[in-house]
């Protein structure tokens, strides 16, 4: 099956892609669409790392380059705290499902499902909603048991490793609240 795999970053993608490829059931196209990552230098570092990783592993990659800080802030306003992640997930997974449908893919998924730091059940729920809305199958996998191994591999390969989830609010939480 042709799968459009939303990829949040290279380190999280490694084991998700390995798992899907090892099953023998999927032909993967990595999909970059992450308007939630700020600031610009961080966005560029994560995007370029993913592209380089895909190119060196012969994985097709589709890039939707959209850095819109102001738009993202407006989208989540006024829920800067509790509800911002739902809006953020919805935006990215919806675009993935939409592109999968328009591009003739059989299914879609997201590497966000590997992170123990994300709201896993919410991601699954949104994926299923988008499956219905766009009539393209959502492949749900609990990739979380592979998270540490994926991070270890990424580190050993010298890939760029981010220190926070993505938005400026998560950056603030990482560096200010953890002091
Ligand atoms: S913390 Fe992460 S998932 Fe939540 S809004 Fe920020 S970038 Fe998106």
Image: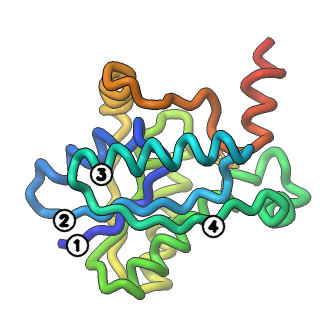
Depth order, front residue of 114/56? 56
Please name the residue shown 80% across and 66% down the image: 71
Asked whether, in this view, residue 33 is left or right of residue 113, the answer is right
Q: Count residues near mark 2 (Cα–Cα under 10 Å), then give few for <14, some for 14-19, many for 20+.
A: some
Q: Can you name the residue that lies furthest to the right here?
A: 78
Q: Give the alpha-carbon distance from disc 3 to disc 2, as whole Å.
A: 15 Å
Mark whose residue sits in front, 3 or 2: 3
Which of the two discs, 4 and 3, labels the residue nearer the N terminus?
A: 3
Label 1 beta carbon within 8 A of ligand 1: no
Q: On the image, which quarter does residue 61 sit in? A: bottom left
| Residue for badge 2 | 27
Q: Tell me whether circle 2 and circle 1 mark residues in contact (CB < 8 Å).
A: yes
Which of the two discs, 2 and 1, labels the residue nearer the N terminus?
A: 1
Q: Tag 3's secondary structure?
A: helix
Give the percent coordinates (x, y) of residue 22.
12, 48
**Tell me, what colour scheme is on the image?**
rainbow
Q: Tell me whether circle 2 and circle 4 mark residues in contact (CB < 8 Å).
A: no
Residue 17 position (above or below residue 68): above
Q: Can you name the residue that lies furthest to the top here?
A: 179
Image quarter where the C terminus lies is top right
Mark whose residue sits in front, 4 or 3: 3
Q: Tag 4's secondary structure?
A: helix
Residue 3 position (above or below residue 149): below
Q: Give the alpha-carbon distance from disc 3 to disc 1, as whole Å.
A: 18 Å
Depth order, front residue of 30/75? 30
| Residue for badge 3 | 55
Image quarter where the N terminus lies is bottom left
Please name the residue shown 25% across and 62% down the image: 28
| Residue for badge 1 | 2
| Residue for badge 4 | 91
Please name the residue shown 45% across and 75% down the image: 97
């Amino acid at each position: 099956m042709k799968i459009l795999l939303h990829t949040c970053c290279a380190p999280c993608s490694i084991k998700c892609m390995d798992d899907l490829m090892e099953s023998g059931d999927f032909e993967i196209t990595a999909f970059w669409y992450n308007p939630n990552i700020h600031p610009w230098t961080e966005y560029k570092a994560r995007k370029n790392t993913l592209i380089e990783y895909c190119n060196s592993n012969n994985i097709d990659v589709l890039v939707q380059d959209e850095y819109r800080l102001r738009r993202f802030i407006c989208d989540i306003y006024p829920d800067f705290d509790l509800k911002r992640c739902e809006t953020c997930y919805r935006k990215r997974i919806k675009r993935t499902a939409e592109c999968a449908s328009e591009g003739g893919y059989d299914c879609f998924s997201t590497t966000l499902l590997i992170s123990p730091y994300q709201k896993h059940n919410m991601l699954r729920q949104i994926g299923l909603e988008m499956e219905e809305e766009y009539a393209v199958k959502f492949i749900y996998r609990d990739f979380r048991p592979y998270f540490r191994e994926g991070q270890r591999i990424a580190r050993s390969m010298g890939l760029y490793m981010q220190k926070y989830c993505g938005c400026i609010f998560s950056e603030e939480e990482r560096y200010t609240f953890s002091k």
